[in-house]
Image (spheres, rainbow, N blue to C red):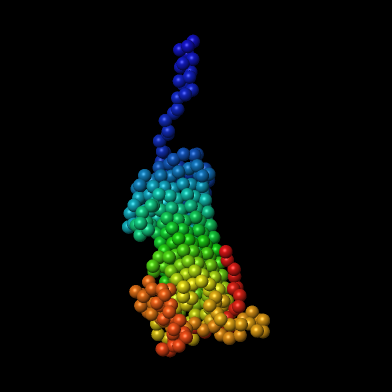
């Protein structure tokens, strides 16, 4: 009896060894088009390819692991849904764009997946009318330049990228991909949160971008709408909250841009009939609030709030600063009154460059900005100018109170 009891005890205490990962590809190959595959919990081997319309679900308990080789999961069909999967351990080839997910098709739904320990996160190539939402994307703990893009759109249009949690990547890159919407995403601890190139008519709305080298940069991307985003702590030496180059007809409205090297950077619109318009933005605690370079006009700034920037606006290059329009902005350095009580100052706000021009035009002098010597020189020039100051801007109706108050 004692021997039988001992045998039963050993049997009950025995723990079966973990099952080996099974290949995912047979599940995909045997499914009929349009099938819904709800995978049992466990680890599955990648890489794998989906070449027919189907739904693949993991309920948050399925891991697809490529073992460090190639792309974990590739989609080459329309009408595919991927939900509740963890995709991990891609290869490490930038040339092959080794990714957690590489997708090409239309009417795709990619939601609530975890993509980690991969080079590139999600790559959309020639993808249209699709939704990528609620995913958690991480690259690898290496130098940002050695990571892959967390999200990459190439020749892809009319897609919605919504409510994704993206961090520790290189960039979100959008190339030759117009008419896409990027809403409610969080992007942190990366190089460029959004990198647009020939991405006309894109909408960037309600995203939270923090601790990236640059928040949003757009090149040759006309008709952008950038609204209601929070862009914080882009303090790389060449970084900016929002940077626009060779871009026309852009609307930048309702954004909070705080503690960046440059809050907003822009050159003049490529087309003189178009404008770059800034409305109701909160620009605060930046080294430079707004930086216009190669200035030839074409900017309109209305109802923005400028607070506690080391220098509110800088304009570098040939051209007349008065070709830009400034109206109804709040300037914390405004020294005027509102005798008629209409909420606007009785005299224009003018930003003049005195000794400050030294550090604007001579980068090496920036180290001494706010030093006692430069502050004294600036004070003496304002008191008794020994050279004509340079007019940077004139706001004919400065607001007496901020348009927005942020914590």
Residue name at image x 45 percent, y 88 percent: 384
Where residue 342 appears, as percent x and y from the top left, is 66, 81
> Total marks drawn?
0
Quarter where residue 122 is shown: bottom left
Q: Is residue 351 above or below residue 85?
A: below
Q: Is residue 200 above or below residue 128?
A: below
Where residue 283 appears, as percent x and y from the top left, is 52, 71
Quarter where residue 389 is shown: bottom left
Quarter where residue 268 is shown: bottom left
Residue name at image x 40 percent, y 59 percent: 170
Q: Nearer the viewer, residue 249 or 144?
A: 144
Q: Is residue 272 visible?
A: no
Residue name at image x 52 percent, y 80 percent: 300
Q: Nearer the viewer, residue 196 or 229?
A: 229
Relative side of 120 to 337, left or right = left
Where residue 155 appears, as percent x and y from the top left, is 43, 64
Where residue 24 appears, as percent x and y from the top left, is 43, 43
Quadrant in which the C terminus appears: bottom right
Q: Nearer the viewer, residue 6 or 288?
A: 288
Q: Is residue 312 visible?
A: yes
Q: Furthest residue to the right?
A: 341
Residue name at image x 55 percent, y 67 percent: 228
Q: Is residue 390 above or below residue 309?
A: below
Q: Furthest residue to the top?
A: 1
């Amino acid at each position: 009896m004692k021997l039988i009891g001992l045998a039963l005890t050993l049997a009950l205490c025995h723990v079966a060894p973990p099952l080996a990962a099974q290949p995912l590809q047979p599940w995909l190959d045997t499914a009929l088009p349009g099938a819904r595959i709800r995978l049992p919990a466990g680890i599955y081997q990648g890489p794998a390819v989906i070449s027919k319309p189907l739904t693949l679900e993991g309920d948050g308990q399925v891991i697809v692991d490529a073992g460090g080789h190639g792309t974990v999961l590739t989609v080459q069909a329309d009408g595919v849904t991927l939900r509740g999967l963890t995709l991990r351990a891609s290869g490490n080839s930038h040339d092959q764009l080794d990714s957690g997910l590489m997708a090409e098709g239309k009417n795709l739904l990619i939601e609530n997946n975890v993509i980690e320990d991969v080079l590139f996160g999600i790559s959309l190539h020639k993808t249209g009318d699709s939704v990528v939402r609620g995913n958690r994307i991480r690259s690898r703990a290496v130098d940002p330049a050695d990571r892959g893009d967390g999200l990459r759109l190439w020749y892809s249009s009319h897609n919605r990228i919504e409510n994704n949690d993206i961090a520790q990547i290189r960039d979100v890159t959008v190339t030759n991909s117009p008419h896409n919407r990027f809403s409610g995403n969080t992007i942190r601890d990366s190089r460029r949160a959004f990198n647009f190139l020939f991405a006309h008519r894109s909408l960037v709305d309600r995203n939270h971008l923090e601790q990236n080298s640059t928040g949003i940069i757009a090149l040759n991307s006309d008709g952008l709408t950038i609204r209601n985003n929070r862009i914080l702590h882009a303090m790389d030496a060449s970084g900016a909250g929002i940077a626009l180059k060779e871009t026309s007809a852009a609307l930048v409205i309702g954004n909070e841009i705080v503690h960046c090297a440059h809050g907003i950077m822009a050159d003049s619109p490529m087309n003189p009939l178009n404008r770059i318009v800034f409305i109701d933005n909160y620009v605060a605690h930046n080294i430079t609030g707004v930086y216009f370079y190669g200035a030839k006009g074409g900017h309109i700034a209305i109802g923005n709030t400028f607070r506690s920037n080391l220098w509110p606006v800088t304009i570098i290059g040939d051209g007349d600063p008065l070709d830009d329009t400034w109206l109804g902005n709040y300037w914390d350095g405004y020294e005027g009154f509102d005798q008629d009580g209409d909420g606007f100052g009785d005299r224009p706000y003018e930003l003049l460059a005195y000794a400050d021009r030294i550090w604007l035009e001579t980068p090496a002098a920036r180290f001494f900005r706010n030093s006692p010597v430069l502050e004294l020189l600036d004070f003496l020039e304002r008191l008794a100018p020994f050279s004509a100051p340079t007019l940077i801007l004139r706001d004919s109706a400065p607001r007496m109170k901020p348009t927005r108050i942020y914590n």
